[in-house]
Image: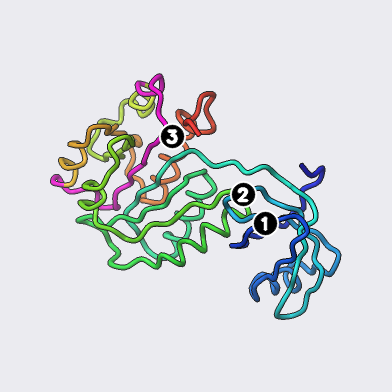
Amino acid sequence: MCAYTPPIRLFVDADLVKGATLSLDREQSHYLGHVMRRSAGDRLEIFNGRTDSFIAELTDISRKSASVQLVELCSDFKTSPDLWFLFAPVKRTRLDFMAQKATELGVRHIQPVNTDYCQVSRVNQDRLSANAVEAAEQTGRLDVPSVGPFLPLHQILAEWPADRHLIFCDEALSADNQIAPLAQLHSKPIAKAGLLIGPEGGFSDTERDHIRQKSLVCPLSLGPRILRSDTAALAALSLFQAVWGDWSVSGLDQ
């Protein structure tokens, strides 16, 4: 483990081995040279989302290219809790925000879902992935959430794993107690969970019935006020992490 972690972290899709030299892409090279004003000899942290991270030294940098050498192990790899974040997409800028904040709040998988009242017909999966990578770089986590394709809710439910809990944010529920449904399950060993956020128009009655038919469903209220989808996502993820996730004493099994 390194004694000092550089403030700059970059993700690379490559195997990391001490002594190896890696070429950075044009965007990363521009960021280091022109935005951060780094030069040869400066150090940064490199991670690949699947193994330990390394301290790397800039060996060459120009306007369009840069290379680094991995010189020292930085951090041991650790995965985030096995939490899936499922949501009905909204406008593009808010969609970017949701992907970034879900990553910052520690989800392992991001899954856009098409519902009856969804406002979006297409989702740029690559853009969501890029937002997840950027957020992972900034937040210090060593893994990067996977991003699934835009799928209809009925398909998600039909293929839902039998051993994964589904936390369902139901706007039709009473707002009396937001903690109780999660607290009741806190004593049970839970290794896998998914958190489902609906569109701003809510779920249809048919969708709500289909969701409740799943065996490991936990309906959850997010309080007495009507929330925008991105606000609901932050509230639900924060609540989940505090009760079940890696903010809590026990946390999800990892």
Location of mark 1 (residue): 16
Which badge, 1 or 2, comes first in the chain's sequence?
1
Q: Give the range drawn in magenta.
A: 184-206
Which badge, 3 or 1, comes first in the chain's sequence?
1
Location of mark 3 (residue): 240
Task: Give the residue drawn at x 37%, y 27%.
Answer: 182
Task: Give the residue drawn at x 75%, y 48%.
Answer: 73
Is residue 190 part of the magenta span, yes or no?
yes
Q: Quadrant of the N terminus?
A: top right
Task: Give the residue drawn at x 78%, y 63%.
Answer: 69
Which badge, 3 or 2, comes first in the chain's sequence?
2
Closer mark to the observer between disc 3 and disc 1: 1
Mark 1 and mark 2 residues within 8 Å of each other at the beta carbon: yes
Closer mark to the observer between disc 3 and disc 2: 2
User: Label 1 vs label 2: CA separation?
Assistant: 8 Å
Location of mark 2 (residue): 51
Indicate the colouring scheme.
rainbow
Count residues near mark 2 (Cα–Cα under 10 Å), then give few for <14, some for 14-19, many for 20+. Answer: some
Q: Is mark 3 on a helix, strand or loop?
A: helix
What amino acid is found at the position of numbered circle 3 in the picture? Phe
Task: Give the residue drawn at x 79%, y 44%.
Answer: 2
Q: Where is residue 26 in the image (x, y as percent from the top left)?
A: 65, 76
Q: Is mark 2 on a helix, strand or loop?
A: loop
190 or 117, nearer to the observer: 190
* 235 with respect to 42 (left or right): left
Q: Position of residue 10 (x, y in %)?
A: 66, 60
Is residue 44 part of the magenta span, yes or no?
no
User: Label 3 vs label 2: CA separation?
Assistant: 26 Å
Residue farthest along the bottom direction in this orientation: 63
Count residues near mark 3 (Cα–Cα under 10 Å), then give few for <14, some for 14-19, many for 20+. Answer: many
Instruction: Tell me if residue 228 comes above or below residue 248 in the rendering.
Output: below
16 or 151, nearer to the observer: 16
